[in-house]
Amino acid sequence: MRATFAITIKELMLLRRDLGGLITLFLMPLMFIVVFSLALGGLYEPDEAESLEVPVSTAGAGEAAARAVERLDAVDGLTMLRQIDGQPLDPARVAALVAAAEYPVGIVFPEGFTAALDDPRLLTGGVDLPLRVTAIVDPAASAPVTAPIEAALRGALQQEVGRALSSAGVEALLAGLGASLPAEARQQLAAMQQAAGGDGQAPPLVTVDRQVPPGVEREQFPSTYQQNVPSYTVLGVFFIATVMITSVFRERTSGAMRRLRAAPVGRAPIVLGKLIPYYLINLVQIVIMFAVGRLIFGLELGSVPALLVVSLPLALTATGLGMAIANLARSETQGIGLAVMLVLTLAALGGSMVPSFIMPEAMQLIGRVTPHAWAIQGFQDVLVRGQGLGGVWLEAGVLSIYAVVFTAVGVWRFRFE
Amino acid sequence: MTHRYGDLTAVDDLSLEIARGEVFGILGPNGAGKSTLISIMSGMLAPTAGAVTLGGSEVTPTAHAVKRRLGVVPQDLALYEALSGRENLRFFGRVYGLSGRRLRDRAAAVLDVVGLADRAGDAAGAYSGGMKRRLNLAAGLIHEPELLMLDEPTVGVDPQSRAHIFDNVERMRRETGMTIVYTTHYMEEAERLCDRVAIVDHGRIVALDTPRGLIQSLGGGVIQLGVDAAQRERAAQALAPLRSVRGVAPGPDGQSLNVEAASAQHTLVDVMQALNAASLPLASVRILEPNLESVFLRFTGRSLRD
Ligand SMILES: Nc1ncnc2c1ncn2[C@@H]1O[C@H](COP(=O)(O)OP(=O)(O)O)[C@@H](O)[C@H]1O
Ligand SMILES: [Mg+2]
């Protein structure tokens, strides 16, 4: 215990003499956040060439809904999915697809939609208004992706409402009232027509309700920073591996590791003394990253304990990886080369550099193998989906497995020279 | 003990016993196995076969209680160059279980002993080669070991630091009665510092005695004759029967004969006569003083500096 402490303190003293390296380590991911947020803020907008698929349920909603869907289908870049595998979609299925993050947005028309619009009593209070069309939105999908879909949906609905208003029922109503319609009523009618777009003063006929799939607690779209702060934090912490490798090899070549071998200390304190300082540095780095996110970029953090529960195993995964490479590599150059390659490849696969949701499905699946993907998902569960401790145990658990495996390899292969 | 690195036997079925309070020298050329021996004796390395005991307790890499009684000064510097001299010592002191006031006192004391007190706050990386060696020595002394092992502590050291290290070793044995194992390939160090010297070659002890005993075993010294390779055999036959010659051995270069003499000067006369009588030409003659260098030559047929 005392030896572990002594070795930890010694390591921190050595690091203090090499502050430049550490500062670079801390600044790099911050730079990434700033640069990529500013330069590529619009990156997540849908690809023009590629059509975005939107599952839609029109079950029991009738022709008016079908026509609105057709209009949406005609919009460039949108493809409506009325059925999957030959099965027409129902509201529950649409919600499930969005909840599974397979599609960013799904649309549900209420049952009896057409019947209500065609009802002659539409304007006389005989129908429950407004009619609610629901846009089910994955809170983790970015606003630039979802907003145009919602806008297109509003446009398509407006046309349906206009058609309903000019339909026989309304005409009859207007004819019945004749020119004697009071100015007040005319105004109201005009307002209603406007209200179909959703921004009139009178109660609108149809509204688009934005909903988060059931089970997902808070509705919020990730800002660029909600994407970038966790992503580059995760990328950044793994760079600790390079510092650890340098430190381990320097200690070996200096012969100091040999002297430690002659000393009355076991492997455990030596390995721990080599892990703990970097583990602490990683935690500090994570805190700084989120603090900067909060204070400078205005990122809402949500449940800090939940963020911590993800951070603790994440930091150990990174230091464990460093320890493993430092003891598997034959030379410092080889170790650093391997570490940089691994750190960048894992980050790219795991969605630290390019968000997973814009990757092809196969890549997303491969990305699942990286600790990065789990860590980012864990952080976004909290930042974006508003989850607390209960929502991140899976990610924290998977990260803990990585942490234990990497650290165990590092300890098992530990070399004094 | 025996130690093998793969196929290479670095320590070959070697046994020795060192008495408490003794300064014990291990003299041998590079590659003889000295450092391997020190590594085993200090518990850094488990031998392939055999065992080392300190007062009855076996020294193994995990025998922490025993290791605490041992100090080792590795052949290669073992320091943190970014830390100051004092920080290095305090760190190694802590690793050996010292703390608080005792740690501070011990660090100050050993800095004094090696003459680095006035540079204690400077980074070890800024020290001269000799100062680093002295700090290396101090780090082995910090916990007041019963047995201190010094592995070639003077290699590449300036004369001043070397003298300092000698003084330290002599003072430590005088004042503390510490047992010291000292490896070197400089025979004058072994002669000056050690009570007993083991001459080691190829992982074996080829001779073990006090420096005086080893030298006396040579008698009058060694005469190195330069003779043509083709005639070496004949020359050896001509010289072997001489009464003043105690032994004849071919030199490692193939061009010389080492003649062990009862008395260098008298033997030389006999040797010249015998060679003249046999019409064997001599290319060179060297009289090697009776010292450990010649002892080494006699036992290994090689020079220490090879
Ligand atoms: N770690 C090692 N692996 C393989 N061979 C080694 C190792 N250390 C030493 N040797 C070899 O063992 C022999 C003895 O080396 P060493 O004990 O260092 O001798 P010395 O200290 O007397 O110069 C040498 O031939 C050396 O090359
Ligand atoms: Mg050596």
Image: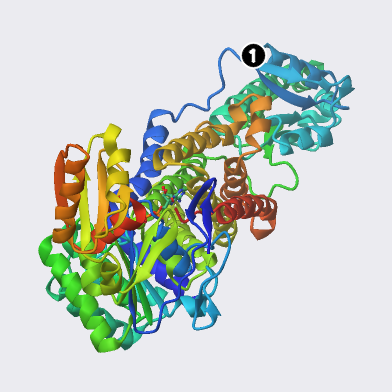
Tell me if A145 is positioned left or right of A232 in this view.
Answer: right
Q: Chain of mark 1?
A: A
The image position of residue A307, as x and y in percent, is 56, 56
Quarter of the image for residue A169 reads top right
Tell me if B261 is positioned left or right of A5 in this view.
Answer: left
Tell me if A373 is positioned left or right of A273 in this view.
Answer: right
The image position of residue A138, as x and y in percent, is 66, 37
A295, B273: nearer the viewer = B273
- The image shows residue A126, relative to residue B16, as above or below, that is above
- The image shows residue A390, relative to residue A180, as above or below, that is below
Residue at image x 48%, y 37%? A338
Residue A186 visible somewhere in the drawing: no
Q: Amino acid at mark 1?
A: Val
Residue at image x 42%, y 40%? A336
Colour approach in the figure: rainbow
- Residue located beneath label 1 in the image: A75
The image position of residue B281, as x and y in percent, is 17, 37
Residue at image x 14%, y 54%? B269
Residue at image x 32%, y 87%? B102
A378, B219: nearer the viewer = B219
Please, what secondary structure does the residue beneath circle 1 have? loop
The image position of residue A267, as x and y in percent, is 53, 64
Residue A357 visible somewhere in the drawing: yes
- Mark 1 closeness class: few <14, some 14–19, many ≥20 residues within 10 Å: some
